Amino acid sequence: MKPVIDLENISEEDLSATRICDLPLKIEGTWLAECIAQLYKELDDKGIIFKPECYLADEWLTPEGETCVGIPFYLAHPVLTRLEKKIMIEAEGDTKEWCMKLLRHEAGHAIEYAYDLHKRAKWRRLFGPSSLEYADTYKFRPYSKNYVRHLEGYYAQYHPDEDFVETFAVWLTPGLNWRELYKGWKALAKLEYVDELMGEIRGKAPAVGSKRKYWRLSILRMTLRNYYKKKRHSLAEDFPDFHDWFLKKLFASSVAQGQKTVRLSGTLVKYRRDILESVARYSGERKYMISDLLKGILARSRQLKIVTADDEPVILSHLCGYVTSLVMNYLYTGRFRGSSVRKGG
């Protein structure tokens, strides 16, 4: 018999030992149901009769070739949302505005598959071949006007499918005057094509149905502890001694005998949140990744007992520049160590 879990009164230790499939979760009766209802209304208002089925999964996704949308299970209960934020720094989609952006994005994937839109010649000319392999990372051009801007991180530049669904999401957003917003952009041609495409499928049933039911929550038998362990491991690198060259070169080596010094770790603790917010804002990277980098720098600066004679503005300048360079290396190459970051003495 499936155990009865009281999420309101369970201890964090017991919660971590709970299997995901045993969590008493459903979409009905939650704020997620209201968001899904709003998505369906937005589609109705555009004359699109197809409504992608939504289910609880381990992440935001639309399975390839499927016409259903997966929503992360941690959004279905505030206790799990808080746990996600504690471990991952943020819970993707935990506000209504953010959730709706992601739902519109995933609905674009489902509609693409439901109507085989990626098979059209003009679709391929504008967005590129859907058959291209997804890369681990992508090089984006922040100032490019060939792509719309919907989700953070210039996601439309990731893959032809993402270019289409981000364009669709902008087109679907209520009250957004996309013709005026993207006037003079090459992305406007894509938006006008999406408008044309949606006119063609208006009132029509989808050509493709869901091939199978994706009730993935019932097959997720790992505990929450192992889920987060795996999630953090797959999304962050571990680099022993990685920061030594930076710390010694820019801080320890600049101290002359007799100078007044301060511990780098103290300044880092004091301004950690400011650095995190600044780097996240300008790089578009997820906060938990940046937070992990800062924790690594802090731990290593303590181990090495790094001191500096620099004042706070100089320290902050060095730290922000260094962390930003690591994040950008990761975005472009999939690794934090790029050609500009050396290891050694």
Image (spheres, grey):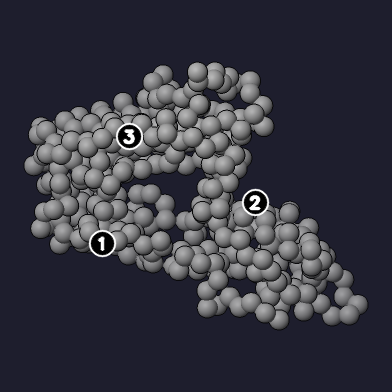
State the quadrant of the C terminus: bottom right
145 over 204 or under it: above or below: below
How far across and how far down the image is residue 73, in percent? 46, 33
Name the residue carrying label 2.
Answer: 273
227 over 286 or under it: above or below: above
Q: Nearer the viewer, mark 1 or mark 2?
A: 1
Q: Nearer the viewer, mark 2 or mark 3?
A: 3
137 over 177 or under it: above or below: below
Real-space CA distance between mark 2 and mark 3, rounded to the nearest whole angstrom: 39 Å
Which tag, 3 or 1, sits closer to the chain's start?
1
Residue plotted at (24% across, 45% down): 65
Which tag, 2 or 3, sits closer to the chain's start?
3
How far across and how far down the image is residue 216, in percent? 39, 34
Residue at far right of view? 258
Residue plotted at (16% across, 59% down): 124
Q: Given the image, on which type of amino acid does mark 1 rest?
A: Leu
Name the residue carrying label 3.
Answer: 214
Pick the front one: 172 or 304 = 304
Pick the front one: 261 or 248 = 248
Disc 1 is placed on an element classified as loop
Residue plotted at (8% across, 42% down): 200
Name the residue carrying label 1.
Answer: 132
Pick the front one: 49 or 320 = 49
Disc 3 is placed on an element classified as loop
